[in-house]
Image (tube, rainbow, N blue to C red):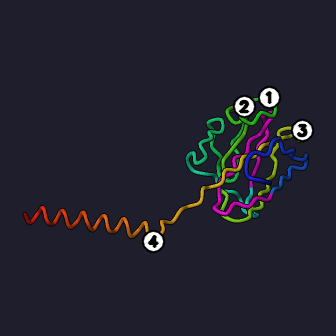
Amino acid sequence: MPSGTANALAAPGSGNLSAVITLPNGGFLTATDVENSGDRFMMDVNGIGATAAVGNPTGLTPGGQQAVGSDTSVPVGGVNCGIDISACLSNPDLSSGTFVLPPGTDTISGTLVATNPETNVFMDFIVEPKPATTVPEPATWLLLSSALLGLGVVRRRNRNA
């Protein structure tokens, strides 16, 4: 599964979801129920229960709900938002959650907890990679050190005058 949005990945009636993604610096997975409310998902990353992200690291606020542990939030009502992920994410009646993805290649799997397993069940994923951290070059450290040393010399000279 590439970085970005994968639209309307169908979850089979048996409730098994699966995807593989590689993120060199790690990232976040936002999963939401789309179409009919009433379904939620227990997410695993590399065979272990996914960790719910703390706060709002992606800037997305899935329906104002928060995932708990590896479980997407519990849906509230029976609505249909089609397969428009933006509409579904902003709807508090649909289950959703944001989970942490560690750096490297991750196998994402999940179990569907459907209120009506005989209906078509859809969910969307949004994968948000963490940006690469930059390390200053030695020349940058040298310039910064020189500037601080110069400020220290000027300050000391002013103090002695």
Magenta stretch: includes residue 77: no
Q: CA distance from mark 3 to mark 4?
A: 57 Å
The foreground one among 68 and 135 is 135
Q: Which quarter shows the N terminus?
A: bottom right
Q: Give the amino acid at mark 4.
A: Pro
The CA span between labels 2 and 3 is 19 Å
Q: Residue at 34% x, 68% y: name it.
A: 145
Provide the residue span drawn in magenta. 20-43
Name the mark nearer the viewer: 3 or 4: 4
Which element carries disc 1, helix, strand or loop?
A: loop
Nearer-N-terminus badge (2/4) = 2
Which labelled disc corresponds to residue 138? 4
**Secondary structure category for the residue under label 3:** loop
Quadrant in the picture for residue 107: bottom right
Residue 156's place in the image compared with 54, above or below, is: below
Which of pointers 2 and 1 lies earlier in the amino acid sequence? 1
* Residue 11 picture location, percent across and down: 86, 46
Task: Give yes or no for contact between labels 2 and 3 (Cβ–Cβ under 8 Å).
Answer: no
- Main secondary-structure element of the magenta-colored stretch: strand
Foreground pick, 132 / 150: 150
Q: Which sits earlier in the primary sequence, circle 2 or circle 3?
A: 2
